[in-house]
Amino acid sequence: MDKKKVVNIDMRQYGMVLALIAVYVIFAILTGGKNLSPANINNLIMQNGYIVILAVGMLLCVLTGNVDLGVGSIVATCGAVIGIGMVDYGWNMWIAIIAALIVGLLCGMFAGFFISKLGIPPFIVTLATMLMGRGLTYVLLQAQTKGPLPNNFVYIGAGFLPTIKVGNVDLICLIVAAVISVLIVMAELKSIATKKKYGFATNPAWQLIVKNAIIIGIVWFFFYKLACYSGIPFVLVLMALLVGLYHFITTKTVAGRQIYALGGNAKAAKLSGINTERVFFWVYTNMGILCAVAGIVLSARNASATPKAGDQFEMDAIASCYIGGAATSGGIGTIIGAVVGAFIMGILNNGMSLYGFSTDLQKIVKGAVLLGAVTIDLVSKRKK
Amino acid sequence: MSDYILEMNHITKEFSGVKALDDVNLKVKKGEVHALCGENGAGKSTLMNVLSGVYPYGTYSGDIVYKGEIGKFHKIKDSEAKGIVIIHQELALSPHLSVAENVFLGNEQCSGKGVIDWTRTRAKAAEMLAKVGLENEDVNVPVNSLGVGKQQLIEIAKAMAKDVELLILDEPTAALNDEESAKLLEIMLELKKQGVTMIIISHKLNEISYVADAITVIRDGHTIETLTKGVDDFSEDRIIKGMVGREMTNRYPIREGVTIGDTIFEVSNWNVYHPEDPERQVLKDVNIQVKAGEVVGLAGLMGAGRTEFAMSVFGKSYGQKISGTVRLNGKEVDLKDVRTAIDNKLAYVSEDRKGNGLVLIDDIKRNMTMAALRNFFSKNGVVDANEEIVKAEEYKKLINVKANSIDQTVGSLSGGNQQKVVLAKWMLTQPDVLILDEPTRGIDVGAKYEIYCVINDLAKAGKAVIIISSEMPEIIGTCDRLYVINEGHIAGELAKEEMTQEKIMGCIMADNRKGA
C-alpha cells in the first residue's frame, strides 16, 4: 500500500470562479478597461458588500431548502432604527449599532419562532415579515429620509483603513497582499502534510501550483488596484471576517454539518439526533442579525436611512446562492459559492452600468444569467 | 364457455433478472370470493399489479384470459374499462374532497365536456353508498371527517361507480378494528350476492376462511395450491402450511463464541397512542428484555406495531401519550429525544433507509458519521475531518461497502451497500443496544449474508441486538429468541428451539381469535 495516491482537482468545483473571471474580462473588453480602474474596483466592493453579507446568511436558509424573503425589509427596518436613533435622539454610534443588531435579532427570532415552533412554511412566514418589515419602516420613518448621519458612523460603509502612501501606492495594501499570499502557501503545505500523515490521496504538484498561483495572482491584482486608490475599505475587512467565519461554520463545525443534514433529509437528520427545530430557529435568527449588519453598512454608505432602502435585496441574495451552485431542494451549496455568485451579479451590474445599459435592460440580463447558470448546473448534473 | 371469469396462465414477471413471479396460475370463478395467500414478498401484489395493468402487457410473459378473451392491459384505465378495479392497501382518497367527489374521482359525472354535473354526482354517489351500507352518510362532508373503516367502504363505493365486475381488495382490513372488519366482510358477502367477483389479499386467515370460496396459495413467486371451500381442508393451520412450507437452506451464518450476559435492555409496560389520534392505542403493555450478546427478534405481520415500538422507544420518535419504563443496565432512563437515546448508547436502524436513514445527496463518509459526529468526531463543536476520513475508511473496509471511495454519494450505491452505510452510521455511535428494523429489506442474497455476519459480530462484541423482520425465515435464522407482536401487544415468546414459522403464525392466529 505504498502506492502514491493521486487525485485530480475537480474543475467543476471552480466553474463558478472561472465564470466570474470570464464575465469580468468580457466587460473589461466591452468597456475598454473602464472596469479595471482602481476607483471601480473599490466601487465593486463598496456596492456589493451588503449583498455579500446577506448572501452568506441566505445560504444557510437555502441549505435548509428554503429562502428568506424578508431580508430587504429587515435591512430597511434596522437602517431606520439607526437613522431615528442618531438623528432624532442623538444616540452615540455604538448604541445605534447595538440597537440595530437587537432589532435584527428580534426580527430573525420572530420568523424563526413561527417556522420552527409552529411549523409554518418559511416562504409564508418571510413573505409576512417582508410586508411587515417594509410597513414598519415606513411608519417609523414617516416615509421620510433621515439624515445625514455623522461621519464616524459613515466610516463603516465608506471609510478606509489608514494608509502609508509611497508615491501613489498604499504600502498597507501590499503588506496585506503579501501576508495573504504567505498564508495561502502555508495552508496548502499544511494540508499536504496532513494528507500525507493520514495516507490520503494528494493532488499532483503542478495542479496545486497553478491553482495557488492563480489565486495569489488575483489577490495581488486586487490589492494593487486598491493600493492605487484609497487603500483597504473598511467594508472589505468586515466582509472578509464574516465570509471567513461562516465558511468555517459551514465546513468545519457540527452546527454547519447539521444544517446540511437537515436540508438533505430532515427525517434522517431527526432520527440521527439532530434537533431540527433548533437548527431552523438559529438559521433564521442568524439571518436577522446579518440583515442588521447589512442595514448598518447600507445606511452608513448612504449616510442616511430611507424607507425604500434594501428593496429587493432578498432577490439578489437568493440569486447569489443559486448562481453559486446551491440547490433549491436544500443540502447543497457553499459560502464561497454564494460569495462568488454575489460578485458575478455585482460585476454584471457594474459592467452594464459602465457600458451604458439602462437599468431595465440590466434586469433582463440578470434574470437571464440566473436562469442560465442554474440550468447549466442542473442539466450537467443530470447527464452525470 | 368456461365458468371462470378470470384465468391467469403461466404468468412470469422478472425485475432486472430476479423472478418475482414464476409460472403462476390463478383461476377465478364468476361470482366467487377468491383469496390470495402468501407471506410478505411472495408475489401477491405483483400478480395483482400484472392483472390491473400497473405492469403493462408485454412486460410479463403468460396470458390473462378475462371473460373468455385475452386481456392486454397497458395501463390501469384499460383494465378498469373492462370492469377490473383494484383497491390498494393505502387508501387512494383525496382527504379534503367531499365523499361524492371522491366516489367519482377520475370518473367525474359530466354534462358536456369537462363540466361537472353536481346534481347527478351527488345523487349517484348516494346510490353507490347505499350499495356498501352507507345509506345514511352525507355525501357532502369531506372524506377525512369519516373513520378509516368508512373510508375503506367509500373506496369500494368508488369501485362500484366504475361498474366493477372483478374487484380486487389488497389487505382491506389491515387498518380496521375488529368491528369495522366484520362490517366490511358482510359488505363483501352482500356484493357477492349482487354478482360481483372478488379477489382478496389478506394476512388475517380467519377472515379468509370466513369469506372466501377458494384460496390460492403463493410462495416465492410460485403457485403452490388452490383450495376450494367444501372440498379441501379450509382451516388456518392448513393454509399456513401451504404458505410457509419451505425448506430452510443454509442462508444464515452460524454464530459462535458468543457469551450471553446479563439483561442490559429492558422495556416494561410500554403504552403508545397514535400520533394523530389520541384515542387509538397502538401499543399495549409491551414488555421485552434483551441480554448482552443476545439477538432477539420481533416477529409479526406488517402493521403489527413493531416499528412503532422501536421508534417510540428510540427517543419518542413516534406516537404520543407514551408511558412505560426503559432500563439500561438495570438503571431507569428517560429517552426524551433521539439525542438522549444516542447518548445512552441506543441505536435504531430504520426500515426506510432512503427516507429515514440516509442523506442521499451526501457522500458515504458524512452519512456514516452523521449520528456520531457530536460525540466522537468533534471537539468544541469543530469537526475533526481527518479522524472522520480514517473511521469512514475503516468501516467501509470492515463491513465491505462496495464503492469507489468514501466521497461517493450514497444515492449512487445499490440498496445493499446503502444498508451497510446505515449500519456503519449506527455502529460508529458505539451503541450497546441496536434495533435493526427490516435490516435486509429489498437487498440481494449476498448482501443479506454479509449483514447477518455483521449482526453476529455485534453479538460477539456483547451488544444487545433486536431484529424486526417480516421475513420469518430470517428471524428464525438469526435470532436466539423472539417475541411475536400482534396488534400492538406481545402475543407470545419463543425460545430458539421452539421457533418455526407454524408456531409464529399460530401465535398470531391464536391472538386474533382471542381478540375477535
Image (cartoon, helix red, strand yellow):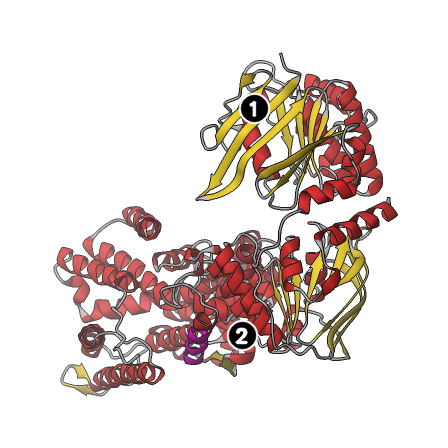
Q: Residue B124, relative to residue B95: is it above or below?
A: above
- Mark drawn on residue B79: 1
Specify whether B185 is left or right of B40.
right
Q: Residue A51, how many percent across, how many down? A: 38, 64
Coordinates of residue A64 in the picture (x, y in percent): 50, 60
The quarter of the picture where residue B317 lies is bottom right
* Chain ID, mark 2: B
Q: Residue at x 24, y 85 (%)?
A: A182
The residue stretch that appears in magenta: B386-394
* Amino acid at pointer 2: Leu
**Mark 2 → mark 1, Cα distance in angstroms:** 50 Å
Which chain is indicated by disc 1? B
Kindly identify which numbered label has been placed on residue B447.
Answer: none
Tell me the element at label 2.
loop
Foreground residue among A354 and A69:
A69
Question: What residue is shown with label 2?
Answer: B428
Q: Residues within 10 Å of mark 2 (few under 14, many from 20)?
A: many
Quarter of the picture containing the C terminus of chain B is: top right
Percent x, y for residue B274? Answer: 75, 53
Question: Can residue B417 be seen in the rendering of this structure?
Answer: yes
